[in-house]
Amino acid sequence: MNQYKFWFVVGSQFLYGPEVLEIVAARAAEMAEKLSKVLPYPLVYKVTAKTNKEITDVVKEANYDDSCAGIITWCHTFSPSKMWINGLANLQKPWCHFATQYNKEIPNEEIDMDFMNLNQAAHGDREHGFIGARLRAPRKIIAGYWENEDVQKRIGSWMKAAVGVAVSKNMKVMRFGDNMREVAVTEGDKVEVQTKLGWQVNTWAVGDLVKVMNEVTEEEIDALVAVYTANYDVATDNMAAIRYQAKEEIAMKKMLDAEGCKAFSNTFQDLYGMEQLPGLASQHLMAQGYGYGGEGDWKVSAMTAIMKAMGENGNGASAFMEDYTYHLVEGQEYSLGAHMLEVCPSLAAGKPRIETHHLGIGMNEKDPARLVFEGKEGDAIVVSLIDMGGRLRLICQDIHCVKPILPMPNLPVARVMWQAEPNLTTGVECWITAGGAHHTVLSYDVTAEQMHDWARMMDIEFVHITKDTTPEKLEQELFLNDLAWKLK
Ligand code: MN
């Protein structure tokens, strides 16, 4: 993920004379250099902009530079905003307005009118804010002292969301087979997602995958099985099933990489020519950062890949998840999430075990190998992207994952147990009111604020279910959103 950079564009004007402009430029370069050491991506100082042309030029350059994942602007001095209109109107990259100040303190003895004219971000950033508001430009506003650790963390967090935008715009999804028959929530308008989010979603025949599988060599399988046994405990004697999953993984990876796809989907209803639904194979691909969606759910697959890329080191703890069943004992209300096989081991509390069990759903001729583990404890979110017809809605719910309260020794799949906000039943009412799917991306790594930032940059509706959400307030919010998005 290190190919991404962010550009620091500092606003000023000629009014103050060349000496002030030199100081502004030197300080901006110093800030970018120091911030680059603590931020997840480099911040490159580009220009102290004084004219319409300088701003328009830097925006054009940013738009066409694939390594530029966004711009961060700041006004050290006053920068009249009419000169920003042409540039900002053409900006196609994420924008963060950093309302900061070079100096931390007002110096009691030293302060005079020269100091005031040089250090007037309080003044300049308001003019800059106005033009963002007037242009209705999607922007993140972060205010605070640039050397403050919390402020730096917020900039870093936004950077990761902006990288999610870059990843989204290059997302290619490989579908092996169609969606599960008759299911509604996994459907969606592929032309709409390509227009809005940049995703290229296309289908490849399962028969083509089987052909590639048949060309996989025993040596390739040996090498991948060695990786499996190094990372996971083998809790089965059925090495043939593990080798078969390795063959599936190698073939899928070859096809994904040949097409530049970072996400894939398949369905148990179409395994024509395959002995097992990919379980361990899909899980280990997810561990490497590929997105996955079961039952042909290409939306959740792409979202999994994007959220993984937004996470720590470009492959965070985010995974395809499914709401399965509830524990409704009073005072002990939990959701149990899992999937029939395919849960990413990035969620695991301990070392996953490779097991083989019979899978009754679908056309599995043989028992598929899969990774079995418990999810780790911690605060997390679940996210669902749905197609509302004419627009997309991103729903995000705050949850807290716990160590599963039951051992469930006969459950042959990876499992995660959580408490949803504001509580299980109200949370379910809110989720159902918003139309959220049973498939989600569960993430310990990406925050709700980052998903909100991402949705703003992608220009799609964002719905957040928190500890303060009530079904009544949510219903009203969705009603107003519906009206607003029709006008947009
Ligand atoms: Mn499912």
Image (cartoon, rainbow, N blue to C red):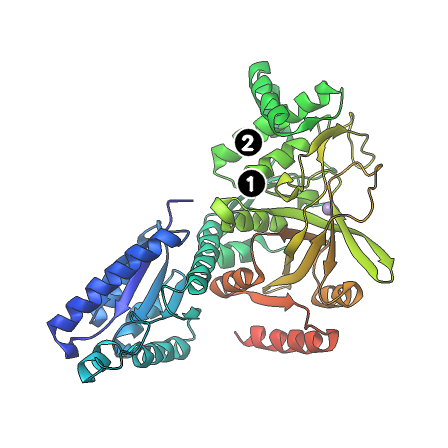
Q: Residues within 10 Å of mark 2 (few under 14, many from 20)?
A: some
Tell me whether circle 2 and circle 1 mark residues in contact (CB < 8 Å). yes
Residue hosting label 1:
290
| Vertical relation: 432 (above or below) 255 | below
Q: In which quarter of the view is residue 475 placed?
A: bottom right
Measuring from the top left, give residue 384's x and y in whole percent: 64, 57
Tag 2 secondary structure: helix
398 left or right, relative to 307: right
- The residue drawn where x is 67% and y is 38% is 350
Measuring from the top left, give residue 281's x and y in whole percent: 64, 31
Residue hosting label 2:
253
| Vertical relation: 294 (above or below) 183 | above
Q: Nearer the viewer, residue 308 or 332?
A: 332
Mark nearer the N terminus (2 vs 1)? 2
Measuring from the top left, give residue 201's x and y in whole percent: 55, 46
Q: Residue furthest left?
A: 18
Whether residue 278 appears in this view of the structure is no
Q: Residue furthest right?
A: 329
Q: Nearer the viewer, residue 168 or 162?
A: 162
Does mark 2 have its CB less than 8 Å from ligand 1? no
- The residue drawn where x is 61% and y is 52% is 443
Amino acid at dot 2: Lys
222 left or right, relative to 23: right
Amino acid at dot 1: Tyr
Whether residue 435 appears in this view of the structure is yes
Q: Residues within 10 Å of mark 1 (few under 14, many from 20)?
A: many
- The residue drawn where x is 20% and y is 84% is 112
Q: In which quarter of the view is residue 79 placed?
A: bottom left
Measuring from the top left, give residue 420's x and y in whole percent: 72, 61
- The residue drawn where x is 65% and y is 76% is 477
